[in-house]
Image (spheres, rainbow, N blue to C red):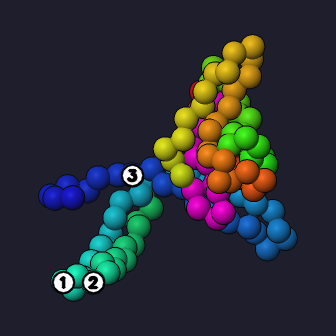
Amino acid sequence: MIGTDTEFLAYLDMIDSIGVYKVYQFSCIFQDLSITSTSGGTTNYSFTLQGTGPLTEITSVDSYVVSSGKITARSTASWKLVAVGIEGAWYYNYSVTNEGGGVFSISVGTAYNGKSVKAAYIPI
């Protein structure tokens, strides 16, 4: 990151005061970034994000239980997968597979069998 303010798309998930789960999308830039390390040691970092636009709630969030390493997904004709939430962390490198016959899935791995995961979508 050299010389310019690059805007990023970020996501924030939280549980509100009455226990309702919510996911928000927003644009931001890195305002501060510090990195410390010692030779052969662990690198530590911290950063501050500066919002550059409004928080937009993503209301299309589905919950699934992983079976055979997969979860059901929404059709890629109408929905874009934003992220998959597993054990409190969001991952953005998953993709939707068209299994045929109107069935769509996301492979998350058999290590997550029986675990509850979330999938967040935005309409196309």
Whichever of labels 2 and 3 marks the residue nearer the N terminus, that label is 3
Task: Determine the residue positioned at 82% across, 68% down.
Answer: 19
Task: Determine the residue positioned at 26% across, 56% down.
Answer: 5
Task: Determine the residue positioned at 15% across, 58% down.
Answer: 3
Whether residue 112 is visible here, answered yes or no, is: yes
Q: Is residue 66 left or right of residue 86?
A: right
The quarter holding residue 17 reads bottom right
Q: For label 2, count other residues whose C-alpha is less than 10 Å away and answer few (under 14), some (14-19) or many (20+).
A: few
Q: Nearer the viewer, residue 95 or 56?
A: 95
Residue that extends furthest to the right in the rendered view of this protein: 18
Horizontal and vertical percent for residue 82? 57, 42
At mark 2, the secondary structure is loop
Q: Circles 1 and 2: CB distance less than 8 Å?
A: yes
Residue 41 is marked as 2
Looking at the picture, does residue 86 appear above or below residue 71? below
Q: CA distance from mark 1 to mark 2?
A: 5 Å
Q: CA distance from mark 2 to mark 3?
A: 30 Å
Q: Nearer the viewer, residue 97 or 85?
A: 97
Task: Determine the residue positioned at 62% across, 46% down.
Answer: 109
Three-letter code for the amino acid on which mark 2 is drawn? Gly
At mark 3, the secondary structure is strand
**Residue denoted by label 3:** 8
Q: For label 3, count other residues whose C-alpha is less than 10 Å away and answer few (under 14), some (14-19) or many (20+).
A: some
**Residue denoted by label 1:** 39
Three-letter code for the amino acid on which mark 3 is drawn? Phe
Horizontal and vertical percent for residue 85? 64, 54
Q: Quadrant of the C terminus?
A: top right
Three-letter code for the amino acid on which mark 1 is drawn? Ser
The quarter holding residue 32 reads bottom left
Whether residue 123 is visible here, answered yes or no, is: no
Q: For label 1, count other residues whose C-alpha is less than 10 Å away and answer few (under 14), some (14-19) or many (20+).
A: few
The span shown in magenta is 78-90
